[in-house]
Image: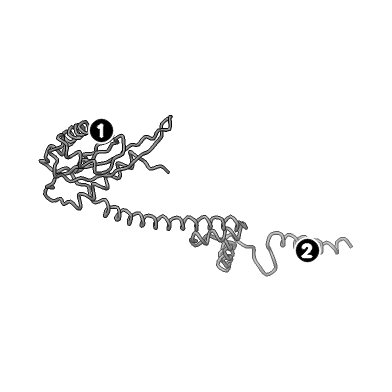
Amino acid sequence: MWKSGLPLVIGLILGYLAGSYGFSRDTAPQTTEDRKDSLIRAEENATTPPLPKNSRKRNLSRKDTVDRAAETFECRPVIQLLENVQAEADACREENDRMRSRLGNLDEDLKQVAGDPIPMPENLDPKHTQPELMRSLKAAFQEKNLNAEIMAVDCTEFPCIIAGKIDGQHDHKLFQELIDTEAMRGYTGSGISSTTGIQRSEDEKGNEDVTFQFGVSFFPKDLPPGLNRKTTGRRTMHRLNQLSDALFPRPE
């Protein structure tokens, strides 16, 4: 009985070995080349899987990137805040451009009012230069018995302008009276531009103190070539106002 069952056992063992090492009834063992061919065919038949939704295969715009980040990480409140900030920045930029345009218009208007600077002419009569003008004006103050103080002189342009203060009540007619003095006889016929103001205060005893504040310019009767009284007077008044405002600021 054992001998009759031996072929069956041997057949089972051989069948097991054939399955383990790739043998079959109808096929031969696979060689290395056969396996390579199988791999190549598998790669050719394979399909490329779709890219994930957030793939960066293509270049995304800044907005697309932000939107995808918002969808992915649920940060829409932060993105909305950034968009609001950007909108406010754009509005500020537009307002800044409008202000620049308005300032440009104001500069043009100021130029129309103030005129262009007038350089000191060559060969100007010495009595209209700073040293001689200061000497003559101080002598005229003394001649009129005026307690006056010259606070500023500007001869960077034509004509020279002078600012100061005098004790007591006066008005613009004082400057013509100064020209009529012996000390300023040489300025007869000169043009006069002036700004004036009155400052009132009280001392410790309640007595009123009055101070006459002034800015004045004396320019020649015959202006240097290329100048006329209208443009010269406009420019001079602008300078006098600037100097007076700097020395005598108005109370708020």
Element type at mark 1: loop
Q: Position of residue 222 (x, y in %)?
A: 11, 47
x then y, percent, for residue 178: 20, 38
Query: Dot 1, how many residues are within 10 Å of its Cα: few (below 14), some (14-19), or many (20+)?
Result: few
Compare residues 208 and 142 and report the one nearer the observer: 208
User: Which quadrant, please, contains the N terminus?
Assistant: bottom right
The answer to whether residue 225 is left or right of residue 174 is left
Say which of 189 and 15 sits in front: 189
Q: Which residue is painted at 27% across and 31% down in the image?
A: 147
Q: Quadrant of residue 69?
A: bottom right
Question: Label 2 sits on what residue type?
Answer: Gly
Q: In the figure, is residue 1 to the left or right of 129?
A: right
**Front tag of 2 and 1:** 1
SS of the residue at dot 2? helix
Q: Position of residue 99 (x, y in %)?
A: 39, 55
Which quadrant is home to the C terminus? Answer: top left
Q: How is the image coloured?
A: one colour
What residue is disc 2 on? 11
Query: Which amino acid type is shown beneath numbered disc 1?
Result: Leu
Residue designated by label 1: 146
226 to 187, vertically: above or below: below
- Mark identifier at residue 223: none
The answer to which image quadrant residue 244 occupies is top left
Residue reaching furthest right? Answer: 1
Name the image quarter holding residue 150.
Answer: top left
Asked whether disc 2 touches disc 1, contact meaning CB atoms under 8 Å apart, the reply is: no
Badge 2: few (under 14), some or many (20 or more) residues near its Cα, within 10 Å? few
